[in-house]
Image (cartoon, rainbow, N blue to C red):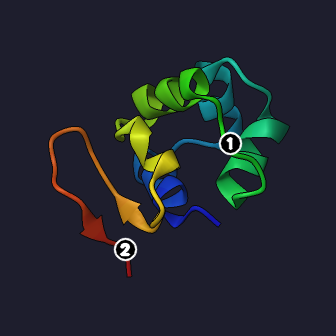
């Protein structure tokens, strides 16, 4: 489970469908990404990062329980 992604989506008040639509992917695929069942391609990670205002590279970090905003340093999620 990618807690950083869930937290970023909920903070914005977005649904799975909204993030998926804005990222040009299916809602089902977005759900799999959020659950940690799939890793997005670089281009999809960038699109999701834009929508949620998170650093897209976090998808490829070994510790995906970090939350990064474009203007913040990494902070742990409790």
Residue 27: image quadrant is: top right
Q: Sequence order check: which comes first, mark 2 or mark 1?
A: 1
- The residue to which callout 2 is attached is 77
On screen, residue 41 above or below 1:
above
Count of labels in the image: 2
- Quadrant housing the N terminus: bottom right
Q: Secondary structure at mark 1?
A: helix
Q: CA distance from mark 2 to mark 1?
A: 20 Å
On screen, residue 23 above or below 9:
above
Rendering coords of residue 5 (x, y %): 51, 53
Q: Residue at x 68, y 42 (%)?
A: 16
- Quadrant housing the C terminus: bottom left
Q: Residue at x 37, y 64 (%)?
A: 66
Rendering coords of residue 69 (x, y %): 27, 45
Q: Secondary structure at mark 2?
A: loop
Rendering coords of residue 34 (x, y %): 66, 53
- The residue to which callout 1 is attached is 16
**Mark 1 burial class by Cα count in 10 Å: few <14, some 14-19, many 20+:** some
On screen, residue 59 above or below 78:
above
Residue 21: image quadrant is: top right
């Amino acid at each position: 489970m990618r807690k950083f992604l869930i937290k970023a989506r909920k903070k914005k008040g977005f649904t799975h469908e909204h993030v998926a639509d804005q990222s040009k992917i299916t809602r089902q695929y977005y759900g799999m990404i959020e659950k940690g069942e799939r890793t997005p391609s670089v281009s999809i990670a960038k699109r999701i990062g834009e929508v949620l205002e998170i650093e897209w590279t976090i998808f490829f970090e070994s510790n995906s329980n970090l939350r990064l905003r474009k203007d913040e340093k990494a902070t742990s999620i409790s």
